Image: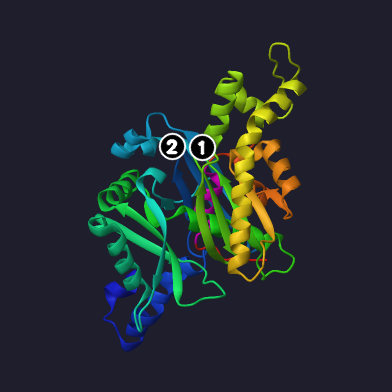
Amino acid sequence: MSLFMKKFTLTPMNMLFDKLLKPALDRLPRVLPGFGRDLSIGLEMGPDRLNLVQMELVAGRPVIRAIASLPYPCPREELLRHPQRLKSLLKQAYALQPFKGRHVVSCLPADQIKIITVSYRCGEGQADATAIVAELRERLKGELDGMVVDFMNLRHEESDTGQRNALVALAPRDKVMAYLGMLTGAGLEVDALDVGPAALARLVCHAGALDTPEFPRFPNVLLVNFGADSSFLTVIWGRRLMLDRAVEFSENRMFSCLKQALDMPEEMAIRLLYEKNATLSMENGSPDEVGRMVAEVLRPEIVPLLQEINKTLVYMASKTRGKSVDQIYLSGRAAGYPGILNSLREKLKVPVEILDPVAVFASKHGHPHEEGLGAAAGIALTTGLALRGVPTNE
């Protein structure tokens, strides 16, 4: 096309192509991922690790092409200030796994973004965005100045009386620009900045499409996403995000309890909780006895988690005329502790399973990667980022 453009003046037919067809063709990579270029890489900068996931379509099904989780060589703040250090870390990831391209979908670090649920009502002819901004200005007053604001509507309740809910993300404009500058300074092209709840909902929808016999009917799912400092209960009703709330249960709370009650260092706690056949011994105690002691120490932490889950299930039933979720998924490293999984399965009347994105989107000819990576902190979120724009298939 470029050669013709140099030699000829635009004719009406050329004009038609330039104005109508070319813009449509330019949009194809976004409408049909995998057509024209490789899928974007999901990139998450966790507290101490860089997480990367890239998908590819095989026979119309999304599978993991490349995945990596690398520890930072320096504090994360140093990477934010010096993009070349991030570029070097990316080079390591590309050497380990077959990542292709430089397009990424990312999200701001959790400590740089605030996500809240806002209830609002639209006046006659009023757009949602206008009503949400008005509600935010009333709630936050002057704090809204200098902020970047984005929102996504939550699924309307069946007993809708005009009140709507939206998940609103707020971040200081300078933080957003600095983060984008770091990514572009490292040689990346940013296709989108996403938010965690939306990415996790996307992951659940894709997993449901692959695992649900009734597809395209999507299951109603409660996702319990365990983090290092806090955990989140996210409800996805079919295709739509309906609820996202934080709970105090966290991996670090478990470690703190074991440290306080048994004087157990974190390294030993990690081995005991997550490694299969871990051979640990304590004075005057066999491994089985140690396991029982750990279960007793952690039980007071798991009970409030169960209460929060039950509270969420009751709330959802009240908003959906008695309906319940079809499935509870657990993600994050703490999901690998059998005591949590067994307790939830015993106490709840809903199927409870671990959502391991590496297992769900495994490729028959995938590149070897670190064992247990699917349960690593941030990998579920990063997979959801990598799935942005990927069509949901059977």
Q: Name the residue tied to disc 2.
A: 47
Residue at 45% in and 45% down: 44
Q: Nearer the viewer, residue 237 or 300?
A: 300
Residue 59, x across and y down, in percent: 66, 62
* Residue picked out by circle 1: 228
Instruction: Note whether residue 364 is visible.
Output: no
Q: Nearer the viewer, residue 128 or 67?
A: 128
Judge whether residue 386 is colored magenta: yes
Q: Please tell me in which quadrant of the rendered image residue 136 appears.
A: bottom left
- Please name which of the two marks, 1 or 2, marks the residue nearer to the observer: 1
Residue placed at 30% from the left, 36% from the top? Answer: 82
Q: Quadrant of residue 370?
A: top right
Local packing at callout 1 (Cα closer than 10 Å; few below 14, some 14-19, many 20+) is some
130 in magenta: no
Q: Is residue 270 above or below residue 128?
A: above
Q: Which residues, given as a range, are shown in magenta?
A: 378-388
Q: Quadrant of residue 110?
A: top left
Considering depth in this image, is 255 or 293 the residue closer to the camera?
A: 293
At mark 2, the secondary structure is loop
Percent position of residue 62, x then y? 61, 58
- Can you tell which mark lies on residue 366? none
Q: Amino acid at mark 2?
A: Pro
Looking at marks 1 and 2 on the same chain, the residue that comes earlier in the sequence is marked by 2
- Residue type highlighted by circle 1: Ala
